[in-house]
Image (cartoon, grey):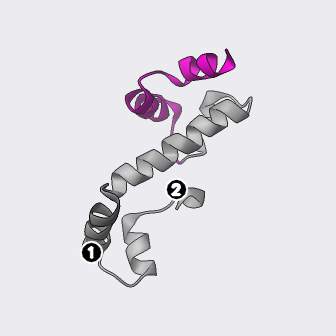
Amino acid sequence: MAAHSDVVTLKDIAAHFSYHPNYISSLLRRELGKTFSEILLEQRMEKGAALLKETGLPIEEIALMPGYRNSSNFYKAFREYYGQSPREYIQEKAL
C-alpha cells in the first residue's frame, strides 16, 4: 500500500481481493487496530515526512506526491499528525 497510497481506495483493495469493502475494513481494524483511513493517513504522512527530510523540493510540490490535491490540505493534515508545520519539521531536522 505504501507505494500507491496516493491513489488507493478501500473499494479498490476490496475489489482486488474479491471481498466486500466492509469485510476489508473490519479485517484491518481487527488485525492492525486501525481503520483504513488511519492507515492511509499514516502512509501519506510518512511519505511526506521522508520527502521533506530527503529532498530539497518545495513543500507545495511535496504535498501533491502523497496524494493531496493542494498544499493547504497537506499542511493541515501534517500539523495535526506531527504537531508542527512542514516548515517547522524541515527546520528541526536540519539542526
Disc marking residue 65:
none
Which sits earlier in the primary sequence, circle 2 or circle 1? 2
Q: Which residue is mark 1?
A: 23
Q: Position of residue 85 (x, y in %)?
A: 49, 22
Q: Which residues are magenta?
A: 67-95
State whether the magenta stretch is mostly helix, strand or loop: helix
Residue depicted at x 58% and y 35%: 49
Disc 2 is placed on an element classified as: loop
Residue depicted at x 57% and y 39%: 48
Q: For the residues carrying marks 2 and 1, which lies nearer the camera in this image?
A: 1
Q: Please state which amino acid type lies under the numbered disc 1.
A: Tyr
> Is the residue 59 above or below the residue 32 in the image?
above
56 sits to left or right of 31: right
Please indicate, yes or no, whether residue 36 appears anywhere in the rendered image.
yes
Is 87 magenta? The answer is yes
Q: Please state which amino acid type lies under the numbered disc 2.
A: Ser
Residue depicted at x 40% and y 33%: 81
User: Which residue extends farthest right?
Assistant: 56
Q: Position of residue 20 (x, y in %)?
A: 29, 78
Is 7 magenta? The answer is no
